[in-house]
Amino acid sequence: MYAVAIDHTLAGHHLDLLTKMFELRRRVLDNCHHDASASGDVEFDVYDMLKPTYLLAMSEEDLVGCVRVLPTTGPTMLRDTFATRLGPNQIPSGPTILESSRFCIASKCASDFDRNGLSRVAYVLFAAMIETMWNLSAQSIVMMTDLRTEHGLNRAGWPMRRLASPQLCSGTVLVPGLLQGSSEALERMSRHANVR
């Protein structure tokens, strides 16, 4: 298993893979009842037009997971879409902070949990997020996640600092948080994923 990063400069060379990613997002986000923007077989929203970097988890040639990464110097899902649910707390932003969103794992891999409650695909994507953070000269990532993933991250050694109280969203309890990048966290995520 490995991860692939595709930014806006490479998107035209990987249209087939990106189409599979948007299809995966449609299947996963429809099932989770998140704020999905579906059209036909794909899920695509306004933030996909802001030149994000996509991180794709691959098993052989099969797409098994994805996450979108955006700079926080412009519009972000956490600040702009979830703003009404977050109360008075400020969401950190700036040139050294990225946002991750649209974290999806294929259903065939989603139940393959370890003792921390996370799948191998999740660890591959988390390791890719840390590497991407460094490649983009950032130090931390803000995200909205569910309680199970928050607990799994904390137990796996990449603790998330909550930015606000948990919020109920379409039947799922979500919590906004901040993750700091570190070589120790990358080593832990890579070890859990069994990747270099």
Image: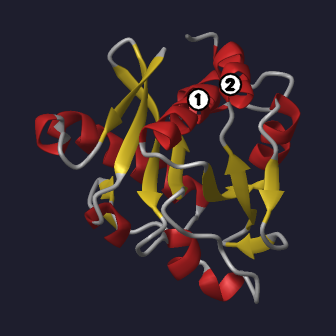
Q: Quadrant of the C terminus?
A: top right
From the top left corner, tell me how far across and down residue 126 is, in percent. Answer: 60, 35
Q: Amino acid at mark 2?
A: Met
Question: Where does label 1 land, which residue?
Answer: 127
What residue is drawn where x is 44% and y is 70%? 73
Q: Can see residue 147?
A: no
Farthest left residue? 12
Label 1: few (<14), some (14–19) or many (≥20) C-alpha neighbours in 10 Å: many
Q: Position of residue 21 (x, y in %)?
A: 34, 42
| Direction from residue 29 to residue 89 in the image, left or right | right
Question: Callout 1, which amino acid?
Answer: Ala
Q: Nearer the viewer, residue 176 or 60?
A: 176
- Could you tell me residue 148's position as x and y percent? 80, 46
Q: Which mark is drawn over residue 189?
A: 2
Quarter of the image holding residue 149? top right
Can you say whether 5 is above or below 172 in the image?
above
Label 2 neighbour load within 10 Å: few <14, some 14-19, many 20+: many
Secondary structure beneath label 2: helix
